[in-house]
Image: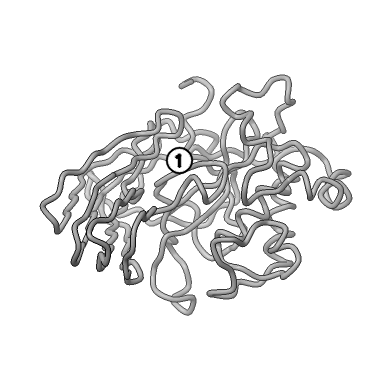
Amino acid sequence: MTTADKASPIRLRYHADLQYEVRSPACDFIFNVQAARTAAQQVVSEKLEISQPVPSQAFIDTATNSRYLRLRAEQGPLRVYCETVVDLVHHRAPTSTLAEVPISELPAETLPYLYPSRYCQSDRLHRFAFAQFGSLQQGYGRVQAIRDWVLGHVEFVSNSSDANTAAVDTLVTKQGVCRDFAHLMIALCRAVNIPARFATGIDYGADPVLGPPDFHAYVEAYVGNRWYMFDPSGTAIPMGFIRLATGRDAADCAFASIFGSVEWQSPLIHIEAIAGADGVLRAPEQCEDGLSTDPGPDAR
């Protein structure tokens, strides 16, 4: 299969249950837990519940389709619950056909993803990245080699990093969680002039030994004139990733940004494949092809 133009969609349902105790008289929140609406990701149904009777504001980043919900909560308990059904249609292509795009031919919207960012210090990894990957044949295979190197040299260790941990730290400590794997892969890709960006979803298919379902960070690299998905932590199934947000790194994609004093519980997340409109259940699976939910150059 080289395209997904006539493929039947995979239908997924997820819910995200976020609970807080607001300690300050009022607290501002910006949430990013709603599925992005794209040409390849149709929101079939959506339910959003906010426990406090406070106004909320929804807005969309037109460059990435990331959806944000802003509200000011009063002191006391706050629960935000989102339940969504989406249809995903994937573009698939043989990896041997996916070449790197020369910088002179990159679409303008991809250029910010060549530069260093807060958590992806590609400028500091330039020499290391070229020593490791500079001589490899350019194309999807080189991106896959970077992904495989990160997976093989970094150990997944829960609670091994914090909000200040960046790609260089992960390279030194050789341990982290999904966002750390993603930051390191992105920095290495950018260091060899491959646009790469940070994406958030839910860890569909993750081994229960790693803990309950959670928000997940993965990577999209620009090759073959599309953004293709990679999971450098190797913990989940990319075909089951529902896109929530994309950005330069985790600073652009937090599921909740909090401006005030709160106590919070770990999010309760659930995701499952369900029967589509035709009554057929199609479960996500690992695949050898390049996999993308980018609509591609014809849609730009």
Kindly identify the residue that appears in the image at 55 percent across and 47 percent down: 198
Left-right relation of 259 to 90: left
Seen from the viewer's position, the closer of residues 77 and 187 is 77
Judging from the image, the colouring scheme is one colour
Left-right relation of 248 to 203: right
Q: Is residue 20 visible?
A: no
Seen from the viewer's position, the closer of residues 83 and 32 is 32
Instruction: Tell me residue 3's x, y (percent).
Output: 50, 33
Position of residue 153 relative to residue 46, above or below, is below
Kindly identify the residue that appears in the image at 58 percent across and 42 percent down: 197
Seen from the viewer's position, the closer of residues 128 and 25 is 25
Position of residue 132 relative to residue 163, above or below, is above
Position of residue 295 relative to residue 139, above or below, is above
In what element is the residue under mark 1?
A: loop
The residue type indicated by label 1 comes to His
Kindly identify the residue that appears in the image at 79 percent across and 38 percent down: 138
Q: Is residue 244 visible?
A: yes
Q: Furthest residue to the bottom? A: 209
| Badge 1: residue crowd in 10 Å (few <14, some 14–19, many ≥20) | many
Seen from the viewer's position, the closer of residues 258 and 194 is 258
Instruction: Tell me residue 36's x, y (percent).
Output: 36, 40
- Residue holding disc 1: 90
Q: Furthest residue to the left? A: 53
Instruction: Tell me residue 99's x, y (percent).
Output: 71, 33
Kindly identify the residue that appears in the image at 22 percent across and 50 percent down: 279
